[in-house]
Image (spheres, helix red, strand yellow):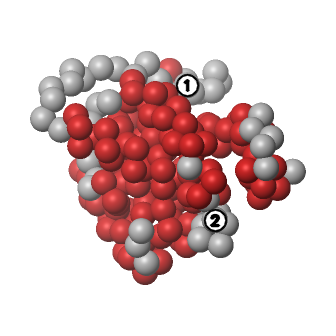
Amino acid sequence: MTDSQMIREIKEGNVELFSELMRRYQRKILAFVYHMLKSSHMELMAEDLCSETFYKAFRSLHSFREVDASFSTWLYTIARNTVLSELRKQRGAHIPLEESGVTPVAPAEIAPEQAILRNEKVELVREAINNLPEKQRSALILREYDQLDYQEIADILGQSVSSVKSLLFRARSSVKLQLEPYFYENYNEQYEGMKSR
């Protein structure tokens, strides 16, 4: 059953189908919300805001019109607005930096040193993304993690497709610039190690 068919049935009174619709999008919306909150160290609120997103979607499903946007685009827009609203509320509040408990796991056959380096690289990339301005970060997450096309991202962010491309270009350039010192330093260490042999 397509999203459209399910939405039509939900609007006609078969509200139990909304839980199936939720199941389809829950992981993606949760990941998106989590990434948006990470730069403010508010990841622990991700599940609550994801639930709030689905609650808002359910409450206003009657006003959803497929001619305006796809359901997923509409849902991402609600998620983004919910997070931005919470961030505005929390602005100025001091929230302690807490570990999220999520650590990348390397395959067992990788040597411990390589696993540590890989995890360190993953953390550096995440940190670089978290340092981006909100719109650049959202565009990059939607494109790279959620694999959305430019038009969908434009609809979610309320931008033109060319603005989205520009945001992505600036985001990628900024991430590359932030990571350059680390990779340059690593390259020099390896080069010096080779020379001393």
Q: Is residue 153 left or right of residue 185?
A: right
User: Mark 2 falls on what kind of element?
Assistant: loop
For the point 63% across and 26% down, the residue is: 107
Residue 93 vertical position relative to residue 32 in the rendered view, above or below = above
Name the quadrant of the C terminus. Answer: top left
Local packing at callout 1 (Cα closer than 10 Å; few below 14, some 14-19, many 20+) is: few
Residue 139 seen in the current view: yes
Residue 167 % position (x, y):
36, 68
For the point 56% across and 49% down, the residue is: 60
According to the picture, the residue beneath numbered tag 1 turns out to be: 105
Q: Amino acid at mark 1?
A: Val
Q: Amino acid at mark 2?
A: Arg
Q: Label 1, label 2: how many angstroms apart (C-alpha)?
A: 42 Å
Residue 37 % position (x, y):
36, 38
According to the picture, the residue beneath numbered tag 2 turns out to be: 65
Residue 188 seen in the current view: no
For the point 55% across and 25% down, the residue is: 105
| Quadrant assignment, res 45 | top left
Residue extending farthest to the bottom is: 162
